[in-house]
Amino acid sequence: MSENLTVTAPEKIDKIRLDKFLAESFPQYSRNQFIRLIEEGAVQIEGQNLNLSPDDKVVAGATYTIIPPEPVEADPEPENIPLDIVYEDSDLLVVNKPAGLVVHPGAGNWTGTLVNALLYHCGDSLSGINGVRRPGIVHRIDKDTSGLLVVAKNDQAHQGLAKQFEVHSIGRIYDAFVWGLTPESGRIEGNIGRSSTNRQKMALVKIGGKPAVTHFERVDAYGLNASHIKCHLETGRTHQIRVHMTSVKHPLIGDDLYGSAPKGAPENIRSFPRQALHAGVLEFIHPIKNERLSFEAPLPEDLKILQENLEKLK
């Protein structure tokens, strides 16, 4: 897609998802392409960016404009980057991503990404459904979050996994270390969209955005200073746990984008260099074999050290 596209919805139109409407309006492009463009903020309604979501219902009579991003000049190259592969077969693989590794190339990170490593490891076998910048990538976790990711090797596996993410049947549990003493358990709900004041941040929004639900359970407490919680995601939105926990006054330790350490916090904890978040459990149905798979990745060394330092606060 190299030029802007514009389409006006009929004055009378049944409730239809935005991604489906655009795909039907421009059949030369795939629905997955429109899903990606909507999620990247490349689709406007009446000339405005309103944090649209692929599953938003089309507004009768409204004009939608697709403004594709600038094309990437170079395809990612294979790079011999070590991978911690916890499972692999001919259809998919599950990787335990270290903190600091970007998932796919983008502005400021054109090399040294998980995609570069996958291209070296898998050769030409990766699914191309997400384009050259994100081959095989079905979902992602932030650069400074560690933990489990599933990667598709062919389009059939990719579509099967994507469907499970769409209906929220993927099991994902994260370990998080947050400031303050949390309740023993809780449920946080609120639409998440791009912040209107800082484009690097996501935020709870009243208009637009994507529905998001996080369940959490406290597994340990360090006095009134901090808590170790397990977060179960019903949905998987960008920065979901970080935004939701900040919204209830328990930002993640080390997450300077969304919160800050309380006054008097010990320096060895205050200075933790990344958000203390780890994707520890991943469960899904194998899209080809129809078997339920479950994987668990232990806390990485830096979070173990953080945990030890927190224990001293009891």
Image (cartoon, rainbow, N blue to C red):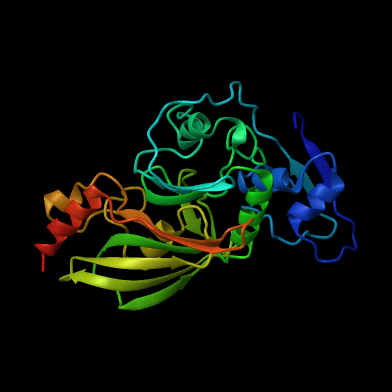
- Residue 255: % across, % down: 32, 51
Q: Nearer the viewer, residue 184 or 303?
A: 303
- Residue 66: % across, % down: 74, 41
**Any part of residue 229 in sight:** yes
Decide: is 198 above or below 311. Answer: above
Q: Residue at x 85, y 43 (%)?
A: 27
Residue 3 location, quadrant: top right
Relative placement, left or right, of 131 versus 183 is: right
- Residue 100: % across, % down: 35, 39
- Residue 75: % across, % down: 59, 24
Q: Nearer the viewer, residue 239 or 84?
A: 84
**Any part of residue 140 in sight:** no
Q: Residue at x 84, y 43 (%)?
A: 26
Relative placement, left or right, of 207 versus 202 is: right
Relative placement, left or right, of 131 versus 62 is: left
Name the image quarter holding the N terminus. Answer: top right
Count of numbered tags: 0
Residue 261 location, quadrant: bottom left
Q: Nearer the viewer, residue 84 or 305?
A: 84
Name the image quarter holding the C terminus. Answer: bottom left
Residue 41 location, quadrant: top right
